[in-house]
Amino acid sequence: MELSITTTRSRQLRKISALVFVFACFLSGPALAKQTPEEKTQAKEEKAAAKEAAEQEKLLQVFVSEPYLELATGPGRGYPVFHVVEREQSVDVLYRRTDWFKVRDEQGVEGWARARDMRRTKLADGSPFVFNLGDRAGFTTHDWEIGMGGGDYGGANLISAYGAYSLTDNMKIDLTLSQFLGNSSNGYKAELGLTHVIVPEWRLSPFLELGTGIVLTEPRATIVLPADRHDQTAYAGAGLRFYLTRRFFLRADYRWHTVFTSRDDNEELEEWKVLIACFF
Amino acid sequence: MESPNRLLLLTGAACAMLMLSGCALFRSKDQKVEKPQTEEQAAAEEEAEDADSTPPRVIDPNVARRKIKVPKIDNENWEIGLGLGFMSVEDFGTSSNYAAQFNYHVTEDFFFRADIGQSTAGKTSFETLGGNIELLTGDERRFTYYSLSLGYNFLPGEVFLGRNLAMNSGFYTLVGIGSVKFAGDNRLTINLGAGFRVLPTDWLAIHIGVQDRVFETDLLGEVKVTNNFETLLSATVFF
């Protein structure tokens, strides 16, 4: 049997709204042909009440199993604690920001509880409340990562940002957007690739990458060169990921590019960069 | 004559149904009293029978476990917003500026910021004094920049408006790299800054920030490092 895990209040609200709905249906049956504006607004209010009840339905309820749960005024360690929730009482989890949860207690008091304390709360069935903490285990297994940094692209300065989605712990699909600023030309590039992290459990973890993209090259204003051009590029690369702390890691890589130019010869370029990245 | 007969029959049937169901109601109450006796008797008989063969069962292991479906908790770590302010382009005066920013809060201390903005540089003093001399065309005066920064939150606190209103606040510093397009050329910039954030509600933040965008240029004849200060008042929402 699957039980609801919402508060009694929301259950009551749901019951009341269901009763109101049935009652409204019963009444509106004969009067359906002619609905006055008052009835319309009433119907709207009922719909809103039902929606609110449904929204409350989605909230997770957890029970305090330590002597008390502290609630702070803001999501940071500097903000003062203004309220405590006693043992055996429940809180509804509204949302999360970094390592803080916005919760509402049975009296309707809302405040921020730290993730470390929320880890010690229990679900309605007595099992512990488990969630992603953003630690070493998260470095190995996560869905998303983003990062930014700089480096060198064929002698030009490189500014780079990337986002990656983990298909598995080992395999990630990533999109990199970069700008390069050189002495003879500037430009932008966008690349889509696959990254294979060889041993994702290691703190210093090597990876291989392969991908393709587009390079837009603009000649510098002061030097006479052919007009802007678009070229396709392909790369193979290797790099290292190093877990720093919390959700942060460093990602350094070397990419060997082949730019398929419209000239007789393809251009071959080396790129290296260091990025600071986080996972979530 | 047929219809009154049918009516009579139907009424009779209805009454019978009601009475039967009524009896069932009463009977169920009586049964409740009787049931434990029969169960006890049966149990006693069973015990007497099983006493020789197997020991009595103390705990019934068939416990129905409750399944909890944990709903997805909403993460509100992203922040997006717009701002207005002033940009002081070195040698080119100060002019109005507008910008968009995008933040991702990684931990309570650190966040990533990507911002993009635009301003139009004014005239150098040489142009102002020299009459009809124009160093740059209208398009070249456009000062467009972006940066990728790492922010660090410090000095969290509250600001008070009157007796009854307290709002969360905090200072932060920023350091990052980016690029600026000015005078028909792109330059690599390093940006350093600080800001103050006030949150009237949990999802809305008002920022006042200052950033110095430093880049090297040879626009006025010699290669030099320029400091371009940006002051920005912005509003962001968390989602």
Image (cartoon, coloured by chain):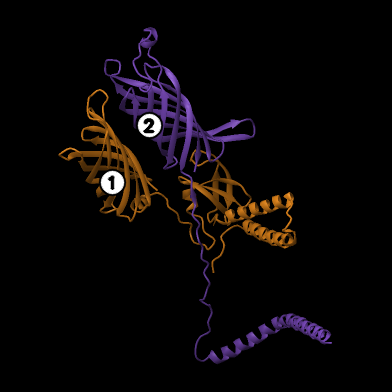
Chain colours: A orange, B purple
- Report which quarter residue A30 is drawn in: bottom right
Decide which of B122, B86 is in the foreground and name it.
Answer: B122
Above or below: residue B47 compared with residue A150:
below
B43 left or right, relative to B177? right
The quadrant of the image that shows the N terminus of chain A is bottom right
* Residue in the picture at 51% in, 58% down: A122
Residue that badge 2 annotates: B146
Give the percent coordinates (x, y) of residue B109: 43, 39
* Residue in the picture at 57% in, 89% down: B46
Q: Which mark is residue A174?
A: none
Give the percent coordinates (x, y) of residue A113: 52, 47
- SS state under label 2: strand
* Residue in the picture at 70% in, 50% down: A41
Q: Amino acid at mark 2?
A: Tyr
Residue at the extreme left: A264
Give the percent coordinates (x, y) of residue A92: 56, 53
Please report, as a chain letter, where disc 1 is located.
A
- SS state under label 1: strand
Decide which of A162, A82 is in the foreground and name it.
Answer: A162
Report how far apart the C-alphas of labels 1 and 2 lie in the structure: 26 Å
Above or below: residue B132 compared with residue A140:
above
- Report which quarter residue B15 is drawn in: bottom right
Decide which of B86, A73 is in the foreground and name it.
Answer: B86
Above or below: residue B12 compared with residue B132:
below
Residue that badge 1 annotates: A241
Task: Please tell me how many numbered marks the rendered image carries.
Answer: 2
Label 1 environment density (alpha carbons within 10 Å; few <14, some 14–19, many ≥20): many
State whether residue A40 appears in this view. Answer: yes
